[in-house]
Image (cartoon, coloured by chain):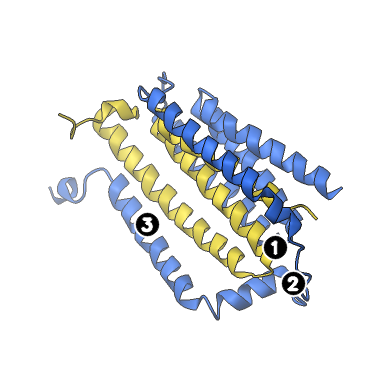
């Protein structure tokens, strides 16, 4: 029986990596990939707690998180394509229209 | 044996998630994310969530990641400036968060391990049956909302990625 804290630690490490990726990378595609990392970290937590508390509700919520992730990817990639068409770059530093 | 599997999966998940952030080429990043998805699926199997493991492989690795690779190859990126200009801020925020997480883990580590797992009656049904049972009874309304979210995302993605809505085709 693996202690719950191991899963929580693993999830924290992955979530933290995703957070750092969102903060430091310039490529929008990598930023979206980092958001996927964070969603997966929360999913690991959900499943681990669902197993530990003997409650299947956690796994149902992983299902919903997966749905939201799929929707986010579809809309996010469409936005990336539109941005690339407008400026022919996906470097986030180039998109500063609202900056003064 | 259980610990061996857990540490293998945990090590590969952590290493490949660091690679996603650190690698230069977006295609390599996406492929290391693929490795991470497969190992998360393996972790789900060790947690007796077999249905979620299958869904993880089919939806994440099969659909989402293919979409990513498709867009990366469609955009045909030449050079990639790697890190953001605000990385000192990120390092500051990150180190504070890491310290906080470390303190929380060290404080709560004993309580989590000391508490014995409650050996309740294991579900007589399989994982998939139990999940479907709950999903279509207790969580029926969120399930319908999720389908609506997917519909809205589908329409939104088509409209956003379409080149010119109606303007050209009118003439």
Q: Which residue bears the numbered disc 1?
A: A52
B159 or A29: nearer the viewer: A29
Q: Are marks 2 and 3 on the same chain?
A: yes
Q: Which residue bears the numbered disc 2?
A: B126
Residue at coordinates 58% horizontally, 54% vertically from top-left?
A43
Residue B85 occupies which quadrant of the picture?
A: top left
Chain containing the residue with disc 1 = A
In the rendered image of this protein, does residue B33 appear above or below residue B138?
Answer: above
B98 or B10: nearer the viewer: B98
Q: Which residue bears the numbered disc 3?
A: B153
Residue A15 occupies which quadrant of the picture?
A: top right
Front of the two marks 2 and 1:
1
Question: Relative to residue B26, is residue B47 drawn left or right?
Answer: right
In the rendered image of this protein, does residue B64 appear above or below residue B26?
Answer: below
> Which tint is chain B?
blue
> Which tint is chain A?
yellow
Q: Are marks 2 and 1 in contact (CB under 8 Å)?
A: no
Front of the two marks 2 and 3:
2
Residue at coordinates 69% horizontally, 55% vertically from top-left?
B112
């Amino acid at each position: 029986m693996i202690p719950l804290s191991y899963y929580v630690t693993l999830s924290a490490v992955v979530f933290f990596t995703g957070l750092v990726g969102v903060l430091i990378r310039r490529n929008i595609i990598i930023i979206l990939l980092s958001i996927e990392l964070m969603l997966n970290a929360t999913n690991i937590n959900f499943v681990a707690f669902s197993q530990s508390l003997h409650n299947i509700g956690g796994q149902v919520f992983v299902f919903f998180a997966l749905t939201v992730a799929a929707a986010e990817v579809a809309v996010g990639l469409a936005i990336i394509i539109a941005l690339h068409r407008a400026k022919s770059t996906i470097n986030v530093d180039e998109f500063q229209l609202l900056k003064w | 044996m259980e610990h061996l599997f857990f540490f293998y999966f945990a090590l590969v998940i952590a290493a490949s998630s660091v690679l996603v952030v650190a690698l230069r080429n977006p295609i390599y990043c996406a492929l290391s994310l693929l490795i991470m998805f497969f190992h998360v699926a393996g972790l789900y199997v060790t947690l007796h969530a077999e249905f979620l493991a299958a869904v993880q492989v089919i939806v994440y690795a099969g659909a989402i990641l293919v979409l990513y690779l498709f867009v990366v190859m469609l955009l045909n990126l030449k050079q990639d400036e790697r890190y953001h200009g605000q990385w000192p801020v990120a390092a500051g925020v990150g180190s504070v968060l890491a310290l906080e997480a470390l303190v929380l883990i060290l404080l709560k580590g004993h309580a989590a391990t000391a508490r014995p797992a409650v050996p309740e009656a294991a579900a007589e049904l399989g994982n998939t049956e139990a999940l479907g049972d709950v999903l279509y009874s207790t969580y029926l309304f969120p399930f319908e909302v999720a389908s609506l979210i997917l519909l809205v995302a589908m329409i939104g993605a088509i409209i956003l990625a379409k080149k010119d809505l109606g303007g050209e085709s009118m003439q």
